[in-house]
Image: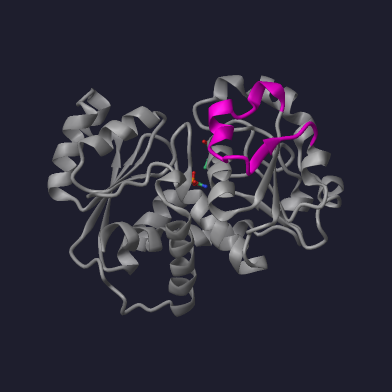
Amino acid sequence: MVRHFLTLGALNPGEARGIVARAMALKRAHDLSHRPLVGRTLAMIFAKSSTRTRVSFEVGMAKLGGHALMLTTAQTQLGREEAVADTAKVLSRMCDAIMIRNDSQADQEELARHSRVPVINGLSERHHPCQLLADMQTWFETSGDPAGKVAAWIGDGNNVCASWIEASRLFGFDLRIAAPAEYRPSAEELALGEGAARLVDTPAAAVDGADVVVTDCWTSMGRESEQAQRIRILAPYQVDAALMRRAAPKALFMHCLPAHRGEEVTAEVIDGPHSVVWDEAENRLWAQMALLEFLLL
Ligand code: CP
Ligand code: NVA
């Protein structure tokens, strides 16, 4: 049966750990003769902007010997209301996998239902599972197995936060979430953590002694009209040096990027000694190569 990757929860803990371990092995080996995807094509549908996701999937397919096709919705018939189901049927006759970045998780599920080939969520309004494979790889590489450790999510309880909640269950760490009432993850999203993720009242309570401090932009793509209100409500949730001092001495600072210095994080923190954001960005490449092997080989 064809496997899709629309949420991190599509994997069991052993599979998730296996993909991360494989990502680390691919990175260490950096073997340009490893080309298991010769002749295979990944269709990449983008309804929203991207730097890292687009580049990492395209470069990753090239390194594995395959090819990636950039398809913006505006330049395809999807932008002229061709049905998602019809698009899935056509693309999956010619391509070996489909990656999609859009708003609607329901449209991604519809695409997957009608696709003969794996569909990968490259970000939706609800989830960003590829980001979490890279983030878990970064955690393993820089300070060992996350199991039994503590991460603090600070700020907007958004799509990336929902995937962190799923990661807390799969990788066995505690996730403390500090978010204002307006922007907390829903009860349904929190339940994805099966007890590993919980809300706390303040950023300080989340960060105290934490091994990882993670945040994301305050205004996700598609929310631009709410920007002024979000900056006002989320202002007390900025990750600054004083907040980082409450974390464990060797705590990591993570951010999926793009970042907005002076909003969700200060320059001192994101460009400082705790920050592993460039490793996270690079690991998108290795983690997704491991994911493509998992889904296609
Ligand atoms: N982190 C991330 O997904 O970045 P892009 O929006 O640049 O793809
Ligand atoms: N939460 C952000 C992540 C960008 C990679 C957004 O959805 O825009």
* Residue 237 vertical placement versus 254 (above, below): above
Q: Which residues are magenta?
A: 180-202
Q: How many marks?
A: 0
**Residue 146 horizontal side relative to residue 95, left or right:** right
Between 153 and 188, the one lying in front of the other is 188
The stretch drawn in magenta includes residue 289: no
Quarter where residue 19 is shown: bottom left
**Quadrant, the C terminus:** bottom left
Q: Residue furthest front?
A: 195
Residue 229 in the image: x percent, y percent? 68, 20
Q: Position of residue 156 (x, y in %)?
A: 64, 32
Instruction: Determine whether, in the image, residue 127 is placed left or right of residue 293.
Output: right
Residue at coordinates 62% horizontally, 56% vertically from top-left?
Answer: 277
Q: Check the image and tell me how it is coloured.
A: one colour
Q: Residue at x 42, y 57 (%)?
A: 56
Q: In this rendered view, identify the residue nearer to me: 173 or 281.
A: 173
Left or right position of 109 against 133: left
Tell me if I can see residue 123 in this picture.
yes
Which residue is at the front of the view, 262 or 193? 193
Relative side of 128 to 168, left or right: left
Front residue (pair 253, 162): 162
Q: Residue 215 placed where, x, y %?
A: 66, 43
Residue 63: % across, % down: 34, 68
Give the residue at x 75% y 58%.
Answer: 251
Can residue 186 be seen from the camera position used here?
Answer: no
